[in-house]
Amino acid sequence: MRTVARETLFKLLFSSQFNDEADDNFKQALYKADKLSDDDIAYCERIFSLIAAHGEEILKEIDKRSTLFPEKRIFPADRSILTIAICEIMYCDDIPDKVSMNEAADIASKYSSAKSASFITGILSSVSEDK
């Protein structure tokens, strides 16, 4: 399970919305604090790189599927969770879509709200269906 790694990645992405980029010292400190294994760190770096390469496309997917709010108005925590899960769904064939969706809903329930979890699940289901 990559639950802790996904939560760490969430923290990195969330913080990067308020800073221009994730500082390498901050990343390393989070990896250490969350006691990530080498495999978990490799996962985080892989997803972070994919988001850097495809971030614009991912944000367009969020915007296209969010009928209530434009992407820029979505709560930053929810946007971070969606970004990770959509990245996994669109660019990581080795991760089942259902795993990405369930983990995203769990992170939303922990760091956002129950309504956010439903909102996120709806958007991710739509992305998965269109894949």
Image: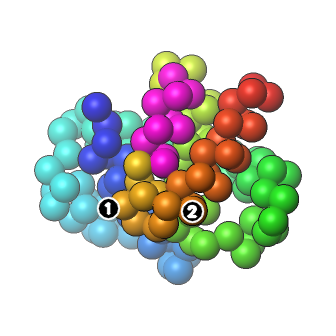
Q: Position of residue 55 (x, y in %)?
A: 67, 52
Image position of 36 (left or right of 96): left
Quarter of the image that includes the N terminus: top left
The residue tagged 1 is 27
**Comparing labels 2 and 1, the label whose residue is closer to the camera:** 2
Looking at the image, can residue 60 be seen?
A: no
Please, is residue 48 above or below residue 96 in the view? below
Picture residue at 81% right of the left edge, 65% below the top: 68
Query: Which secondary structure lies at badge 1?
Result: helix
Q: Amino acid at mark 2?
A: Lys
Q: Position of residue 25 (x, y in %)?
A: 28, 68
Q: Are marks 2 and 1 in contact (CB under 8 Å)?
A: no
The residue tagged 2 is 115
**Looking at this view, is 37 or 76 the one in front?**
76
Looking at the image, can residue 19 be seen?
A: yes
Q: Amino acid at mark 1?
A: Lys
Please, is residue 130 above or below residue 120 in the view? above
Picture residue at 46% right of the left edge, 67% below the top: 112
Image position of 15 (left or right of 66): left
Which region is colored magenta?
96-105
- Give the numbered dot on residue 87: none
Q: What distance separates the C-alpha of mark 2 from that of mark 1? A: 29 Å
Would you say residue 99 sits in the magenta stretch?
A: yes
Query: Which secondary structure lies at badge 2?
Result: helix
Q: Position of residue 84 (x, y in %)?
A: 53, 48
Q: Position of residue 18 (x, y in %)?
A: 53, 80
Quarter of the image that includes the C terminus: top right
Label 1 crowd bin: few (<14), some (14–19), many (20+), radius 10 Å: some
Secondary structure character of the magenta stretch overall: helix
